[in-house]
Image (cartoon, coloured by chain):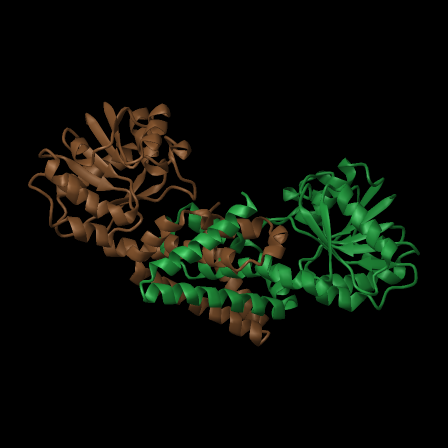
Chain colours: A brown, B green
Amino acid sequence: MHTLTLVGVGLIGGSIGLAAKKRGLVRQVRGVGRNRSTLERAQALSAIDEICLDLTAAASGSDCIILCTPVDRIAEQVLQLAPHCRPGTLITDAGSTKGLIVQAVEDHMPAEVHFVGSHPLAGSEKRGPEYANADLFQNRWTIVTQTPKTDGTALNRVMTFWQQLGARVRIMEPQEHDRALAMTSHLPHLLASALAGILPAQWKDLTASGFRDTTRIAAGDADLWTAIFNHNRQALLVALQSLEGQLSQYRQALERNDDTTITHLLAQAKKVRDALGS
Amino acid sequence: MHTLTLVGVGLIGGSIGLAAKKRGLVRQVRGVGRNRSTLERAQALSAIDEICLDLTAAASGSDCIILCTPVDRIAEQVLQLAPHCRPGTLITDAGSTKGLIVQAVEDHMPAEVHFVGSHPLAGSEKRGPEYANADLFQNRWTIVTQTPKTDGTALNRVMTFWQQLGARVRIMEPQEHDRALAMTSHLPHLLASALAGILPAQWKDLTASGFRDTTRIAAGDADLWTAIFNHNRQALLVALQSLEGQLSQYRQALERNDDTTITHLLAQAKKVRDALGS
């Protein structure tokens, strides 16, 4: 691959640039964004080689374009740049939701330009190219989406790309991805934020590692996460309902002083958590 | 202080032994427990100098006794060993709840033997002397409880002891401690467990650092935490009710597609979490 274009050069975009260059997968990495200062920081960190402030200009001459922007901007940007791509260009993304994005773009690709949705399960509550890391995807899962309309060759190219960055790849339908991530990522964010949100100020000093671990991701950007919640509303509501049901089991057991049920619930949760590893 | 007796030599007891010895606060640390193998491991790690399997025998000849056992056993053990203590013996504990323990013991101390409740806000989901650490209490808060019946000299001695281990000390009433810890420790544990408990097995691989951080403490021991929940039932139910109310705000905002409220809730939570530090 000659030219890889990254739209958005924060933690994820910057890490893709570093990882692709470290592994010799591309000759040149082009960074696109609206904020020149972020692009310059990414360039100074060698995450990108070249800066481009214009999305459509960046599209032409790229072999692969990866959208690493907030989920509510990805589809619109894909539709904007696709007409400027040359045949054979591969477009993918790194968004935390897939259903709305894939649905919005897959019927609107020019001939010989293909979009395949991706979601690398990596990142943190931190933002910016300063937190980029060439090994961010190593041994982590990346979901690649497939629908009846997905081009098989493009799917394989996207899978190979992530595998070359060190990721393990799993294919899912966009809706299945969103249901799973509602539970494994979006609900945890909501919960962490709900817990942080009710902490009375006078008890701040009385938090130890348990509270801090449990609420760490609540430090994530509010606008980014509002967009994710909005994109995955239905699945997130289903996951939240399941959680509320579980909390209600704890509450009822506490109310009737039922230690047996509490121990049973805690032991089952411990088993699940132990199986995840550290 | 000549002889410090630790009842329970796991993560907390072991860390107190290591910390007191490292700082030269005691001549000899005696470890008491039912499980000889745990005591021998603690001795091998130099967390204790001497092993004792009999609680009442250990009590005599101690200057200070610290109960580092599960919360549902502390009061009973204090009442059992107190009659065997010589005048001037100081008894404290490291239990995660304070109300029931202090209430159960403070009227039943022999003359010149004093109990003061303590709770060092340190630890982890790990168990056993292998995880003990001489600096566990360094710059961490330890709560010391005071009631109208607390002996002032004993309170000062307990505070000085924790301060000498590197801790910052805060005095609270037992009930205030329990209300605060219900929010800062017991509810996070319940939440982490509730979330881990509803994860479908087929999505286990799709968890990343967010899910793992948020559920880390669910790996704690189910029996220990059942006892803590039982001891702090009322305050935990109040904290849980507050959390359920907050979740309901998120749910309603999601249902009506109200991004403004979601952003407001997330931004307020981020502010709280950012203020806690890493």
At a point 43% along the width and 69% down the height, the residue shown is A245
Image location (x, y in percent) of residue B132: 66, 43
Q: Quadrant of residue B130?
A: top right
Residue at 71% x, 46% y is B168
Say which residue appears at 20% left-offset and 46% top-offset. A76
- Image quadrant holding the C terminus of chain B, namely top right
Is any atom of residue A15 visible in this view?
A: yes
Side (left or right) of A172 relative to B205:
left
Regarding residue B54, the answer to whether it shows in the image is no
Side (left or right) of A150 relative to B106: left
Residue B5, percent from left and from top: 81, 49
B250 or B234: nearer the viewer: B250
Foreground of the two, B17 or A174: A174
B229 relative to A162 in the view: left or right: right
The part of the image, by quadrant, that contains residue B147 is: bottom right
B122 vs A59, left or right, is right
